[in-house]
Amino acid sequence: MNYSEKKEITMLLRELEIRNAKKSFWLFCKCMAPDFYLDNRYHLKLLCDDLQKLYEGKLLKPDGTPFKKFMLNMPPQHGKSRTLVNFCDWVFGQNLNEKIITCSYNDLTASDFSRYTRDGIMQRKNNEEDIDYSDIFPLTKIKDGNAGFEKWALEGQHFSYLGAGVGGSITSKGGSILIVDDPIKDAETAFNEGALDKIWRWYTSTFLSRVSAPSGEPIEIVNMTRWSKNDICGRILTGPEADDWYTILFEAYNEATDKMLCPELLSKKRYLSQQTNMDDAIFRANYHQEPVDIQGRLYQDLKEYNDFPKDDKGNILFESLISYTDTADTGADNLCSIVGGVYKGEIWVLDIYYTNEAMEITEPGTADFLVGNLIGGHSIKAKIESNNGGRGFARNVDKLIWDRHKTRKVNVEWFHQSENKVARILTNASYITNHMFFPKGWSYKYSEAYKHVASYQKVGKNKHDDIEDVLTGLAEMVNSGATGWMDFLKDGQAEIDKRVEERKVIPFTRDRVV
């Protein structure tokens, strides 16, 4: 084969590579950075393929409709932001009319993202054999005099791209593709509840209002380290639109298989060095996508239910209904009341009343709440803590139940809680995790209550413990006798024997854990 023939074959292969890069985002990335997008880096291949499916409407939900929202959580230095920059460039090659808005934690990082995207389009080859962006997408060019870092346009367009810092203004600009890239700078921000709330308000108001997609629904991409349960990803995943999001989460190291995600980008030696030298919470957030405020939380993996336990005929099998109420001790506390159904020593949470309203509202509110949860023909055994004015509250609730609803099926009992609250909460946490069931979707139906339960820490000062106290009270009612066992100890042996015979139960003894 002579030189001319070799050159012709080379040019034909080059042309094939260009054509394939137009069609395939993965192959486009390989053309733009062949030394980085290697075939053995499967996480990058998976990410590229899924992003292309997202753009083309081929990334489908279980019901067959396409995902428009995409969430990416990946360790640092593994190519997530670089791939998103390439995605923007590839998308502009597919459609000159796309409008992209990207936001990062400050204007500097947003400018970097914008500049890398712009420079990718303006890239020029060093020699004839190389492939640059203009070879693949010759019609996609930056408009002359419109190539600033933060905002620029393609030829023939008034506006194509805007990069802004989180919290910044993006007024008058609309996007068909909205990308949030690392909106949280560091662990300090992740521990700052006020900063997280500010980021969320900006995201849900300013950022998501910037829509100009023809269908009215843009592509949304959130790319970030999972710092906190209250970060953007955490709030989305516990919200009503969680099922609308396609999520990719990569850990740097798989502890089950003892394999690194990509040894070339992060070796196990380097990983172990980071583990030794970094704060554990920050390390787990960066390399395992475990939010810093979830790692130390008391209640892990609370169970949810879709329906009550029922027999073959559809009858609810609850053996009893119980409720526990903690009135607001101080102005900073909330009133919390929960009703649960008991079956085989386990509790199904039926409803939660959690509010910081004044007592003139919460007294009738609690009465209505308790009566409204009478189901299955059962009465409710309702315990109300009498500490700090709780006794008067309980008396008024009891009276209001009769005055407003004319029923005696709510048995109100007030009592003084003298045991240490924190010790009680810690002691009963295992039961709550393993034997208490919450209604499906309670994370957004009872969002404030859920937020406090999900963030309650094993060690350290917790801002509130109202709902944790009530969950603990319910657990104690089942395990310590409000529904049976411990009351036996108060009645004398003869009464115990009588009640055991009547109820055909095994009596409680101090050397037996019930």
Image (cartoon, grey):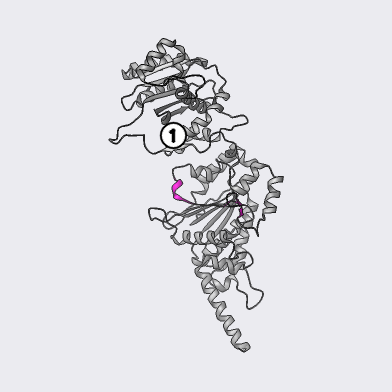
Q: Residue furthest left?
A: 313
Span of residues in magenta: 241-260
Q: Is residue 460 above or below residue 119?
A: above
Relative to 376, residue 80 above or below = below
Badge 1: few (under 14), some or many (20 or more) residues near its Cα, within 10 Å?
many
Instruction: Please name whichever residue, 394 or 141, is drawn nearer the observer in this view of the structure.
Output: 394
**Which amino acid type is shown beneath numbered disc 1?**
Phe
The picture places residue 240, in percent across and down from the top left corner, at: 44, 43
481 vs 263: above or below = above
**Residue 144 visible to the viewer:** no
Count the marks. 1
Q: Which residue is mark 1?
A: 437
175 and 241: which one is in front? Answer: 241
The image quarter containing residue 202 is: top right
Residue 151 part of the magenta-drawn span: no
Look at the image and tell me whether residue 56 can be seen. yes
The residue depicted at 49 percent of the width and 69 percent of the height is 23
Horizontally, is 191 left or right of 440 in the view?
right
* 364 sits left or right of 282 in the view: left
Residue at 68% across / 42% down in the picture?
279
Residue 348 place in picture, x, y as percent: 41, 31
Picture coordinates of residue 134 (x, y %)?
57, 72
Image quadrant containing the N terminus: bottom right
Identified at 48% across, 27% down, the residue is 471
254 magenta-colored: yes
Relative to 419, does residue 69 appear above or below in the rendering? Answer: below
Element type at mark 1: strand
Where's residue 456, x and y in %? 56, 32
